[in-house]
Image (cartoon, helix red, strand yellow):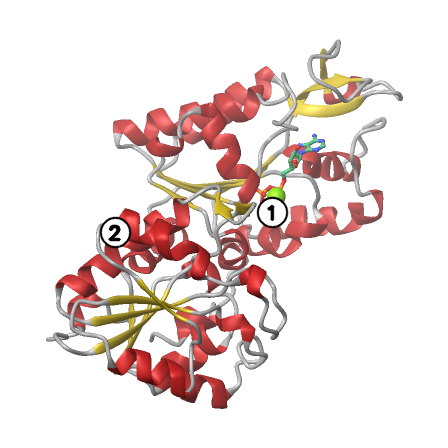
Amino acid sequence: MAYKTLDDMGDIAGKRVLLREDLNVPTAEAKVTDDTRLRAAVPTIAELADKGAVVLVLAHFGRPKGQRNPEMSLALVTKPLEHLLGRPVQFVPDCQGAEAEAAVAAMSPGDVAILENTRFHAGEEKNDPALAAAMARLGDAFVNDAFSAAHRAHASTEGLARLLPAFAGRQMEAELAALQKALGQPEHPVAAVVGGAKVSTKLDVLTHLVTKVDHLIIGGGMANTFLAARGVNVGKSLCEHDLTGTAEQILEAADRANCTVHLPYDVVVATEFRPDPPTRTVNVHEVGADEMILDIGPAATEALADVLKTCRTLVWNGPLGAFETPPFDTATVSLARTAAALTREGSLVSVAGGGDTVAALNQAGVAEDFTFVSTAGGAFLEWMEGKALPGVEALG
Ligand code: ADP
Ligand code: MG
């Protein structure tokens, strides 16, 4: 999809730019506990301010459900952002209306302000044209830098982009470029790793991917449902027995699309789910009635590494095992390290996303080595489902 970036904005000195960011940071006792999202916003804010724009940052924070709620005020992130940015940041206590208009009118080129939580207005999540128009009055241009909020058609992500000249921020641009490389026009062969707990949460992902990739690697709890569909007795494993028919259909669709599906043939099992219990590594046909499959086995992991060595592109969502509990992170860590090494050698483009996936890659110490790691949970998954993201579409 074609979209404009900061490079297409022309001379923005003195122009008021409404900049949608993701500032939805985790907090505890009114303190930011992880500033990853703030740091990610800095390049675009700094670039716009350096070019002399009046930078008006729009964002949501928590779920105030259309009500003013002091506990969800973005005032909290003003100081941390100021610190990271190395320049003053003002706080404007509304994202629209007369008070906001007066505050913005008093700002000078290069000034930066955070406007109050967009979700204090019920019109935000309803994509109310009246709210979008009221926000649009504050700015001359709109920049969306929040890929993670782009799967929602809200006033500050979609509505505004229809009212003002709209551009992708640097973060958005990087995310879109990486995703395009991984599934838009990827170099083949392409492998997808899909793991995690349940088939039911990733049905659309699986259905879309079989038409896109050459190798579909299924791990995690969801592999158990596929194994059950193939007649394997999975014992006490996490398994959606009511979805074995659906799993069967996905396998048939893969067959028709010439997509090779890789299910584990050996697995690590235990009778108790706790750190470091006694385990057995067995063929999938040897799982005991009282045992749970908690990771894929070493032979399967090695075979998957060989598959990755033949591939040019990898997209990964979902851990291969119950990685939070040792030793059931073994396969995930091992395959992630293989992918990282292949990426470093330049033979693989590797893109990964998903909350637990990012945690698992960090645990393996390889997140930095992947070509791109998306921290946009919901938006990343919808993109893997092949869905159009309204916030991105509106930039086109
Ligand atoms: P993501 O957040 O990256 O999209 P998911 O939320 O779909 O990933 O899945 C992650 C969860 O799946 C983890 O909590 C992990 O423990 C669980 N999981 C993976 N394999 C198994 C398994 N064999 N049995 C039970 N849970 C598993
Ligand atoms: Mg998760």
Q: Looking at the image, is 173 positioned above or below residue 368? A: below
Q: Is residue 178 left or right of residue 358?
A: left
Pointer 2 or 1: first along the chain:
2
Residue 50 seen in the figure: yes
Does dot 2 land on a helix, a strand or a loop?
A: helix
Task: Confirm if mark 1 falls within 8 A of ligand 1.
Answer: no
Asked whether 124 or 93 is in front, the reply is 93
Q: Quadrant of the C terminus?
A: bottom left
Q: Position of residue 362 (x, y in %)?
A: 46, 30
Does dot 1 land on a helix, a strand or a loop?
A: helix
Q: Which residue is mark 2?
A: 85
Q: Residue at x 69, y 12 (%)?
A: 276
Q: Quadrant of the N terminus?
A: bottom left
Asked whether 235 or 176 is in front, the reply is 176
Q: Residues within 10 Å of mark 1 (few under 14, many from 20)?
A: some
Q: Residue at x 52, y 47 (%)?
A: 26
Q: Quadrant of ligand 2?
A: top right
Q: Position of residue 385 (x, y in %)?
A: 55, 58
Q: Position of residue 316 (x, y in %)?
A: 49, 40
Q: Is residue 305 left or right of residue 82?
A: right
Check the image and name the residue furthest to the right: 289
Q: Is label 2 in contact with label 1 (beta carbons under 8 Å)?
A: no
Q: Position of residue 261 (x, y in %)?
A: 59, 39
Toward which corner of the image does residue 110 lie, by quadrant?
bottom left
Which mark, by number, is residue 255? 1
Q: Looking at the image, is 324 positioned above or below residue 143? A: above
Per the model, the C-alpha gap separating discs 2 and 1 is: 51 Å
